[in-house]
Amino acid sequence: MAIEAAIAMQVGSGVMKGVAADKAGKAQQKQLEQQAETVRAEAKRDAGRLRLRHKQATARKKLQFFHQGVGMAGSPANIIASDMNLQDEEARAIITRGNAQSNLLITQGLNARSEGRASLLSGIMGGISSGIQTYAMANSLKTESLDTLGTGTQTSDTLTPRLGGNNTPKGFNNNFNKVYNA
C-alpha cells in the first residue's frame, strides 16, 4: 500500500508541476498579447497625432502663401504635396513599426504558451516515469527479499554475512551474532 501511495505522489507531483508551468505559460501569453495590443494602439495614436500636426503645419503654409499673395498653383502646390507625402510615409512607418513590435510580442506569447504545454506533457511523462521506476524498484526489492528467504525458513547462515564483518553498522554490538547464532 505504501508503494502505491509513493507512486501516486510521484505521478501527482509531476502532473502538478506540469499544470503550474502550463498556467504560467498561459498567463505570460495573455500578458504579452495585452502588451502587443497596447503597442499597436500607441502606434496608431502616435501616427494620428503626427498626421494632425502635419495637417496643421500644411494649413499654416497655405495661409503664409495666401498672405504673401502667392497662388497655390505650381511650385507652392508641389511643395505642399511633397510635404504631405513625406508626412504620410512617416505616419505609416510609425504604424508599421508598432505592428512589428506587436507581432513580436504575440510570437513571444505563443512561444511561452508552447513551452507551458511542453512542460505540462513533460511533467505528466516525468511523473509516470518516476512512478514506473518506483514500482520497478519496489518489485525488485520484494523479489530480492523473497530470494533471501528462500523456502521461507531463515537460517543463521543467511543472516551472518549481513550482520557480521564489514557490513556491521558502526557502534553495533557484535555479540548479537554470537547470541543469535548460538
Image (tube, rainbow, N blue to C red):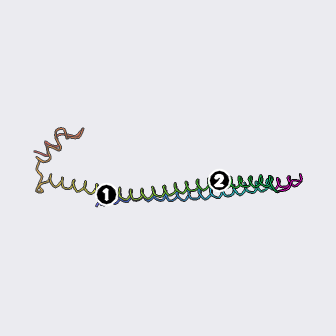
Instruction: Please identify, in this view, whether the residue under mark 2 or under mark 1 is nearer the observer.
Output: 2
How many residues crowd around disc 1 within 10 Å: few (fewer than 14), some, or many (20 or more)?
many
Residue 78 in the image, given as x and y percentages of width and height: 77, 54
Residue 31 in the image, given as x and y percentages of width and height: 56, 57
Name the residue type under label 2.
Ala
Q: In this view of the protein, can residue 13 be seen by the observer?
A: no
* Residue that carries the numbered disc 1 in the rendered image: 131
- Judged by its main secondary structure, the magenta piece is helix
Name the residue type under label 1.
Gly
Q: Give the range drawn in magenta.
A: 59-72
Q: Residue at x 62, y 55 (%)?
A: 96
Residue furthest front in the image: 74
Please identify the quadrant where the C terminus is shown.
Answer: top left
Q: Quadrant of residue 140?
A: bottom left
Q: Which of 24 and 167 is in front in this view?
A: 24
- Mark 1: which secondary structure? helix
Q: Which of 167 and 98 is in front in this view?
A: 98
Q: Mark number for residue 93?
A: 2
